[in-house]
Image (cartoon, grey):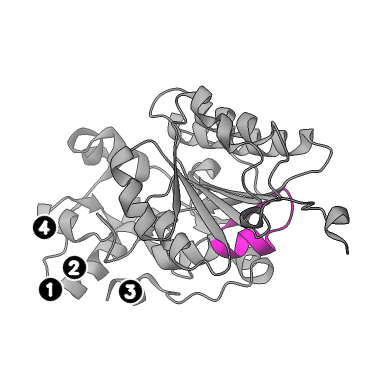
Amino acid sequence: MPSNQSPLGALPSRFKRERLLIIGCGDVGVRVARVQRHVRVLALTSNAQRVAELRGLGVTPLLGNLDAPSTLQRLAGLATRVLHLAPPPLQGSTDPRTLALTRALMQRTPPRTLVYGSTSGVYGDCNGAWVSEQRLVNPATPRAQRRVDAEQRVCHHARLRSHAVRVSILRIPGIYAPDREGGTPRERLLRGTPVLQAADDVFTNHIHANDLARACQLALWRGKAQRAVNVNDDSQMRMGDYFDMAAALYGLPTPPRISRAQAQTDMSAMQLSFMSESRRLVNTRMKRELRLQLRYPQVQDGLA
């Protein structure tokens, strides 16, 4: 096809290959950047001190702030694929950061693909039931409500364009990895933080940071349009059993067990929020559609 008939037209050579823009290039975003081949990687950062670090990874840093929409205008038409991993603000029930981002991205030629890293907390408490992506969201906390708002915003803006953006929503549980800051339960075990007694305990779900990065990468290329995908490993553990297992791996004492009534008085609101929801995520769609083969199918595989 002659260059003047190509969808890329006569763009400069640096724009003729795929361009991945990572929003929220923290631990998982960096892992994604490291596995890119033949793709130009750009990352939005609000911290000028990270510019050298990102350049060292072969990433082009773009200074901007999701809380200052005027700084996002340069993102319009810049990337063919976008990975959005930035969290919402800590307050409120909506996510103005995602709103500002999607408005900026859609001002010119939109990306072909947008992958948003959400949370499995959007499902709320499911009383230990198996939960697939077909289950309706039921956020029980402002934190989860903000994530639902972000999911809805990326899907809504993607449908506004004549050339629809293929959006993938990744619903992510607890992320762990020994080489991730705070990525193991060791510190909590050393503090002796209690867990719920067996009668009150909840199911918890996990994903290794490397497997999550691979899921993000696959979703950018294989994800189906306007589709949510649970991204979790194959482990089926109650929270107390998870900490007992980790204690055995590290040679530490197992945490004390307390009743839910005692937890209401002894634990912080944040800790209680994680102990108030129980679900077991179904990851069939992740395996069938993204074709992700887990390197750490059980949480003990990744902690050992």
Q: Is residue 271 left or right of residue 34?
A: left
- Mark 4 neighbour class, 10 Å CA radius: few under 14, some 14 to 19, many 20 or more: few
The answer to whether residue 189 is above or below residue 44 is: below
Mark 1 and mark 3: span between their CA atoms?
14 Å
- Residue 151 lies within the magenta run: no
User: From which residue to which does the magenta span run?
Assistant: 217-230
Mark 2 and mark 4: span between their CA atoms?
9 Å
Mark 3 and mark 4: span between their CA atoms?
18 Å
Label 3 residue SS: helix
Question: In percent of the image, x 47 and y 31: which residue is there?
Answer: 66
Q: Is residue 52 left or right of residue 31?
A: left
Can residue 64 be seen from the camera position used here?
yes
In this view of the protein, which residue sits in the foreground, 36 or 153? 36
The residue wearing badge 2 is: 247
| Earlier-in-chain disc, 3 versus 4 | 4
| Earlier-in-chain disc, 1 versus 4 | 4
Instruction: Please tell me the numbered disc located at residue 190.
Output: 4
Label 1 residue SS: loop
Instruction: Please tell me the numbered disc located at residue 300.
Output: 3
Q: Amino acid at mark 4?
A: Leu
Label 2 residue SS: helix
| Earlier-in-chain disc, 2 versus 4 | 4
The residue wearing badge 1 is: 251
Percent x, y for residue 254? Answer: 16, 64
Q: Amino acid at mark 2?
A: Ala
- Residue 221 lies within the magenta run: yes
Q: Amino acid at mark 1?
A: Gly
Mark 2 and mark 1: span between their CA atoms?
6 Å
